[in-house]
Image (cartoon, rainbow, N blue to C red):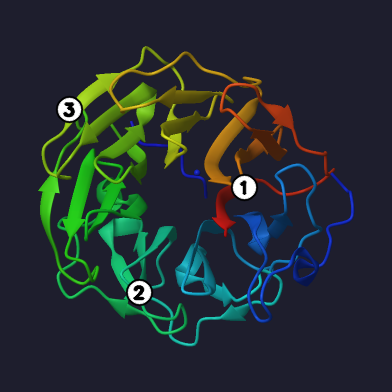
């Protein structure tokens, strides 16, 4: 069974420059992206800006690096920004069109992964190149949902219980493995702690590896799907489409779920400025919560009618 296709507050937000960032750089904040090209900014995970996105097609992934924010989505859509408010569409987007689900930054470049097992890289978020040796396999069963930069390499995971390893450039992908216990262990998220990777997926699948090639599995007894995972403040934290957050220090032993539960669906999690923020959907509206410890979760200030948010990143 594949992960569901995720087609994973009206206080005034102070102008970014007022937070003390150097001229020309974004101030620390969270940035969430979602349906219909929507983008929302928050200094704390509680209060959120109005929609400052470029509009258009759905955005499923967002990453920050080298002073640039990149958001990716449907039909090879890529937008980049230096402040999260003014967006420019990529002049040379990934070949396709393909649906781009995940994007990460490392080794002075962005790498995006897609439906059909595609991988693309860019130094500036504007001009994109297809990987010369992309992840093996084609078709819907090898759709890649997430990517992370780890031990001088990129690791991407996807629907067919696949983990793909690249060189440090994201251009040559050559080592494939199967972290989960079955081919139905669709994987939706991957994180790097500095010493190990953790992937998360359908029905509570959670696997860890120090190399990205040999995996040990720990499966929750869940009907939920784990949609995303991050590592920060000494903990892995995975979010589920049942509205829960699961915590682990090492990726092998996991806590019970914390959070509001259903009907919330959590798609993504990020950490910054001493707090975690999760985003998702709530009855076709937005779910957003914040926490300082990963166990006690507080609702963000509500925004009526905001489209679902599929990804979130922290801009330091």
Q: What x and y, as percent, mark residue 94?
A: 38, 76
Residue at 29% over, 19% down: 219
Which numbered disc covers residue 273?
1
Residue at 71% over, 71% down: 85
Q: CA distance from mark 3 to mark 2?
A: 30 Å
Write down the quadrant of residue 35 in the picture: bottom right
Please name which of the two marks, 3 or 2, marks the residue nearer to the observer.
Answer: 2
Does dot 1 land on a helix, a strand or a loop?
Answer: loop
Tell me the crowding category of disc 2: few under 14, some 14 to 19, or many 20 or more residues within 10 angstroms, Cα based.
Answer: few
Does dot 3 land on a helix, a strand or a loop?
Answer: strand
Nearer-the-camera pick, 296 or 226: 296
Earlier sequence position, callout 3 versus callout 2: 2
Q: Which residue is mark 2?
A: 108
Let me know if residue 144 appears in the view: yes
Which numbered disc covers residue 139?
none
| Residue 312 placement, left or right of 24 | left
Q: What x and y, as percent, mark residue 99?
A: 43, 61
Q: Which residue is mark 3?
A: 216
| Quadrant (top left, top right, bottom left, bottom right) of the C terminus | bottom right
Residue at 32% over, 26% down: 205
Residue contact at pointers 2 and 1, CB within 8 angstroms: no
């Amino acid at each position: 069974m594949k992960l569901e296709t995720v087609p994973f507050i009206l206080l005034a937000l102070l102008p970014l420059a007022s937070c003390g960032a150097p001229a020309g750089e974004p101030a620390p904040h969270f940035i969430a992206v979602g349906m219909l090209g929507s983008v929302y900014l928050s200094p704390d995970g509680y209060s959120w800006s109005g929609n400052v996105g470029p509009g258009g097609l759905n955005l499923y992934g967002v990453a920050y690096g080298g002073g640039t924010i990149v958001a990716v989505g449907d039909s090879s859509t890529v937008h980049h920004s230096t402040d999260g408010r003014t967006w420019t569409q990529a002049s040379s987007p990934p070949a396709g069109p393909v649906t781009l689900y995940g994007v990460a930054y490392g080794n002075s470049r962005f790498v995006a992964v897609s439906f059909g097992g595609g991988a693309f890289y860019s130094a500036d978020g504007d001009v994109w190149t297809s990987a010369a040796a992309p992840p093996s396999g084609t078709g819907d069963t090898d759709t890649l949902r997430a990517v992370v930069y780890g031990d001088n390499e990129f690791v991407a995971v996807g629907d067919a219980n696949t983990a793909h390893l690249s060189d440090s450039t994201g251009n040559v992908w050559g080592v494939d493995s199967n972290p989960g216990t079955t081919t139905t262990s669709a994987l939706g998220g991957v994180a790097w702690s500095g010493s190990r990777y953790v992937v998360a997926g359908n029905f509570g699948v959670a696997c860890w590896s120090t190399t990205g090639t040999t995996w040990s599995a720990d499966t929750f007894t869940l009907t939920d799907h784990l949609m995303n995972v991050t590592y920060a403040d000494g903990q892995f934290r995975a979010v589920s489409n049942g509205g829960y957050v699961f915590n682990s220090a090492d990726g092998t032993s996991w806590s019970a779920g914390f959070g509001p539960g259903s009907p919330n669906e959590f798609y993504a999690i990020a950490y910054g400025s001493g707090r975690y923020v999760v985003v998702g959907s709530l009855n076709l509206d937005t779910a957003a919560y914040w926490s300082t410890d990963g166990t006690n979760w507080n609702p963000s200030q509500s925004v009526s009618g905001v489209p679902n948010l599929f990804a979130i990143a922290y801009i330091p």
